[in-house]
Amino acid sequence: MPLVLVTGGTGHLGRDIVARLVRDGHRVRVFTRSPRPAMQVEWAIGDLATGEGLPAAMQGVHTVISAATDSPIARRGGVRPTDFVRSPSAVDVQGTEQLIAACRDASVQHLLHVSIVGLEEAMLPYARVKLAGEKLVRDSSLPWSVVRATPFYYLLEKMLAGVAWLPVWPLPKTQFNPVDTADVADYLVRCAFDGVRGVRADIGGPDTLSCVEFARQYQASQHLHCTIVPMSDRLGRRMGFIGSDGVRGTLSWRDWLGRRELGMRAAA
Ligand SMILES: NC(=O)c1ccc[n+]([C@@H]2O[C@H](COP(=O)([O-])OP(=O)(O)OC[C@H]3O[C@@H](n4cnc5c(N)ncnc54)[C@H](OP(=O)(O)O)[C@@H]3O)[C@@H](O)[C@H]2O)c1
């Protein structure tokens, strides 16, 4: 089996990509700043922000799946005023540039880059950073693919949990179809090995609903009764709540919330 290097393999999506690759019998190496002992994979230690560790990480690698990112919004699960002004680019832009150079030097056969649906329309600086990173991949001389995904359920849940204490939730009416990371991982692994290159179909979740409806389902799962005030559709799209008519995942938001609840009860 050819060796696959996953950047961001310790993240939400990355852990599902690694699990899927391992299940399919692939040899997997994860590029990280700090290995996690619980994961049974080969580790390559380094830092995309500096390029440290990349040449060694590439040795013998056939395919790279690039799923690392530095998103302060995803990390904290909420938007702050500074997020409308700037977003760090060291990982997603300069790091992608260094990754491409390392892939070229090591004659990597395929660089599969994970991106986000609707980057051109979203106004947050993080979207501009992601777009710049994606463009570097598309302009590179490597054999590359780009897969864009809609927002992940884990992030939607984090954002809604962050406003749970408010009696009134102002939320955009925007329709979109967030998706489960395991569904995205399954699709990415198919795209990594089906021999096709270039911009692939986007992936989103099975249900297209408004942010308001997703929030109502969340409230029902948490037995919350906060008032929801619908806000402008356009604002939601500018914030990145953008759907896709491409490939559809199978796990619904309602079922994802149910599974999460069961997991938390089992862990308690
Ligand atoms: N979140 C969403 O809603 C969403 C939607 C569509 C697409 N995407 C895209 O999907 C991908 C994965 O997103 P995610 O939300 O799953 O990410 P995440 O959970 O925030 O994980 C981020 C990953 O990036 C790695 N990373 C961060 N800084 C690094 C550095 N300096 N050097 C090396 N690795 C670094 C981290 O690894 P270590 O900490 O182990 O170093 C971690 O594995 C990203 O490309 C993202 O843009 C996300």
Image: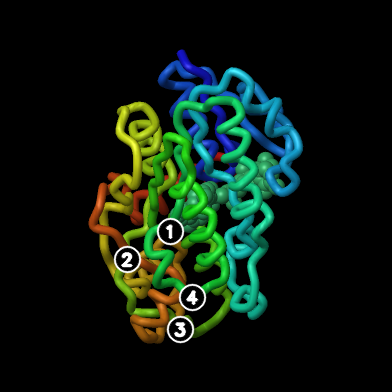
The first of marks 2 and 3 along the sequence is 3
Report the amino acid beneath label 1: Pro
Q: Which numbered tag is attached to residue 199?
A: none
Q: Nearer the viewer, residue 52 or 82?
A: 52
Say which quarter of the image contains residue 229. bottom left
The residue singled out by tag 2 in the image is 176
Secondary structure category for the residue under label 3: strand
Image-based side of 169 in relation to 202, left or right: right
Rendering coords of residue 202 (x, y %) = 32, 51
Which sits earlier in the primary sequence, circle 3 or circle 4?
Answer: 4
Marks 2 and 1: in contact by CB < 8 Å? yes
Q: Residue at x 39, y 86 (%)?
A: 231
Rendered view: 211 above or below 134: below
User: Disc 4 marks which residue?
Assistant: 123
Q: Do the CB atoms of the residues marked 2 and 3 lie less than 8 Å apart?
A: no
- CA distance for labels 3 and 1: 19 Å
x and y percent of residue 81 in the render?
64, 80
| Residue at mark 3: C-beta within 8 A of ligand 1 | no
| Residue hosting label 3 | 170
Quadrant for the C terminus in the image: top right
Q: Nearer the viewer, residue 50 or 176?
A: 50
The amino acid sitting under disc 2 is Phe
Foreground disc of the pair 3, 4: 4
Give the residue drawn at x 32%, y 50%.
Answer: 203
Residue at horizontal 51 percent and vertical 65 percent from the top: 127
In primary-sequence order, the first of circles 4 and 2 is 4
- Give above or below for 264 relative to 44: below
- C-alpha distance separating marks 2 and 3: 17 Å
Closer to the camera, 70 or 168?
A: 70
